[in-house]
Image: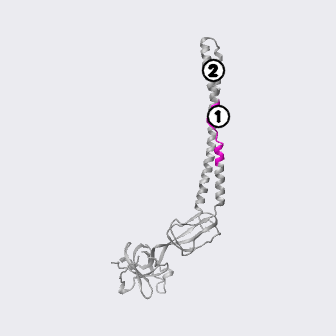
């Protein structure tokens, strides 16, 4: 928001000059494939979480279907432990009933103890068979379930890849550059477009060391931008960054007189009103805005 304020530097001249900029984001591809949809043009205004494009998911979808099919097939092969053990349990139950009857006969002297011993041996064999079958089925179950878990993990990875094929805009902003077009093949990490935050602007400036004694983080300053017909538009800026080390005057602002001067990089935050454009020259007045 523009702030109408009158602020003068030394003898009414600016304390320094700078260049307007915006925070930018380079939106890149997360997956490999052909771009089958792309709704991005330079200068278009995008909102956060807008789906602006899609990378072909045909191969990944087929891969996912194959993994799901394999997992379902393995589930159908899981052994029914209860059903398979039930046959032996019924045999054991039958022998237990017979043992009860023979025990009564042995006590009465009507049957030989050898018959009872035979039944006990058969029961012991069945119990061993039941334990062995349960152990075998448990190992088989464990192996199949392990294979199913591995397939499900692979399926989750593929689902994540499919989700990342959607090109989602990360922040509110304006598209300042477009690097690819519809139907092009892209790889992970390849830039798709550049986005500039259209609400939070800043001014990059470079001050000589002597000036820093009057400046600290959080200070308000006046920033003036050309508004046409020799008029100036004023903004309230806040000092958000002061470099710890000096550097030579950057190429983009140096002149013959200043190219060997050691300066400190300072960043001044502004709130954009829609008028500010990246690259605009700015005048900076250090006295706090009242």
Above or below for 132 versus 153: above
Quarter that holds the N terminus: bottom left
Q: Does the CB distance between marks 1 and 2 fall below 8 Å?
A: no
Q: Position of residue 278 (x, y in %)?
A: 49, 78
Above or below for 170 versus 6: above
Residue drawn 61% across the image and 44% down it: 145
Q: Position of residue 265 (x, y in %)?
A: 45, 76
Q: Can residue 70 be seen in the rendering of this structure?
A: yes
Quarter that holds the C terminus: bottom left
Q: Residue furthest bottom?
A: 229
Residue drawn 63% across the image and 32% down it: 85
The segment highlighted magenta reads: 71-87
The residue carrying pointer 2 sits among few (fewer than 14), some (14 to 19) or many (20 or more) residues within 10 Å by Cα, namely: few
Above or below for 226 versus 62: below
Q: Position of residue 37 (x, y in %)?
A: 61, 67
Residue located beneath label 1 in the image: 84
Above or below for 225 versus 114: below
Residue located beneath label 2 in the image: 98
Q: Position of residue 40 (x, y in %)?
A: 57, 71
Q: Secondary structure at mark 1?
A: helix
Q: Quadrant of residue 218?
A: bottom left
26 drawn magenta: no
Residue drawn 37% across the image and 75% down it: 220
| Label 1, label 2: how far apart the Cα atoms are | 23 Å
């Amino acid at each position: 928001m523009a702030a109408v304020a009158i602020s003068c530097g030394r003898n009414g001249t600016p304390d320094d000059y700078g260049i307007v900029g915006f925070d930018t984001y380079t939106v890149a591809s997360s997956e490999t494939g052909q771009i089958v949809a792309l709704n991005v043009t330079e200068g278009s205004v995008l909102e956060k979480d807008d789906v602006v494009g899609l990378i072909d998911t045909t191969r990944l979808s087929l891969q996912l279907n194959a993994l799901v099919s394999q997992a379902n097939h393995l589930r159908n092969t899981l052994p029914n432990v209860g059903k398979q053990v039930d046959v032996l349990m019924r045999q054991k139950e039958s022998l237990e009933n017979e043992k009860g009857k023979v025990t009564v006969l042995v006590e009465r002297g009507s049957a030989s103890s050898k018959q009872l011993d035979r039944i006990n041996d058969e029961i012991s064999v069945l119990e061993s068979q039941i334990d062995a079958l349960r152990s075998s089925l448990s190992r088989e179950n464990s192996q199949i379930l392990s294979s199913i878990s591995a397939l499900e993990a692979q399926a989750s990875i593929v689902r994540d890849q499919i989700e990342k094929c959607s090109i989602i805009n990360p922040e509110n902003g304006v598209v300042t550059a477009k690097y690819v077009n519809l139907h092009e093949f892209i790889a992970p990490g390849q830039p798709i477009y550049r986005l500039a935050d259209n609400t939070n602007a800043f001014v990059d400036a470079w001050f000589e060391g002597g000036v820093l004694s009057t400046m600290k983080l959080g200070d308000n300053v006046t920033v003036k931008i050309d508004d046409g017909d020799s008029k100036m538009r004023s903004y309230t800026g806040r000092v958000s960054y002061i470099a710890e080390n000096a550097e030579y005057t950057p190429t983009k602002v140096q002149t013959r007189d200043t190219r060997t001067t050691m300066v400190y990089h300072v960043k001044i935050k502004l709130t954009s009103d829609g008028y500010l454009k990246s690259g605009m020259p700015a005048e900076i007045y250090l006295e706090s805005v009242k």
